[in-house]
Image: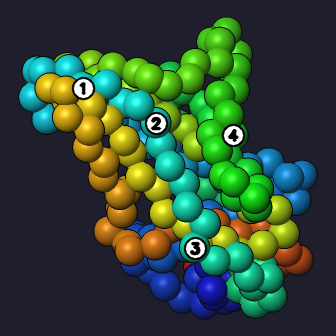
Amino acid sequence: MNKSLEELRQDSSSDKLQQGVAVTSTQDDPADLTLTLQAKSPQAIVVTGVTVRRLSAAPVPNTGSVVNMECGGLMSPRVFDVDLMAKEISLHPVSRGDSKAVDFPLKVSDSDPEQLSLQLLPGDRDVRFSVEVNWISEGEAHSETVADGVPVLRVTGPGRLPTYSYAETFAKP
């Protein structure tokens, strides 16, 4: 967040963290970008891959705060490591828990969605990037850029910013 702890406490809105940027931890844990893929009709589509493009990489910010947020999901995602600072960015399937690593292609329909977990590794940089999902439907290739309401996605390494729990961002009575 581009705010101090005091500024976060003064913001009482329920969506105060919406403008935050994903941050990796100091232990070099990746930031997670979860994509849920679902066809618009019962006709299955074949997802052939995901393309990640680095648009810029700058030094990590030296002002602001890191707010830890944890949330759970209901689906078991297919997990991929993504080194955003690699010369050529690619997705590498990862095995987690009892599930084995699964690569593309994969099939989805309106009643059988898939969830992908992109484990983003920006290193010690502030990276702006785009994500494009590629698929085939009825023999024709298609692609769509993941926007999530913003033109460019962003993730940053932790730098030396102070870290707080989400609960700490609320004013104390």
Mark found first going from the N terminus, 2 or 4: 2
When the figure is inspected, residue 28 is found, relative to residue 47, above or below; the finding is: below
Circle number at residue 55: 3
Query: Which numbered mark, 2 or 4, is in the foreground of this view?
Result: 2
| Residue type marked 2 | Gly
Q: Which residue is mark 1?
A: 45
Task: State the SS at label 2.
Answer: strand
Q: Which residue is mark 4?
A: 81
Tag 3 near tag 4, CB within 8 Å: no
Image point (82%, 62%), residue name: 123
Q: Which residue is mark 2?
A: 49
When the figure is inspected, residue 34 is found, relative to residue 8, above or below; the finding is: above
| Residue type marked 1 | Ile
Calculate the distance from the C-alpha at mark 3 to the C-alpha at mark 4: 18 Å
Image point (70%, 20%), residue name: 95
Query: Which numbered mark, 1 or 4, is in the foreground of this view?
Result: 1
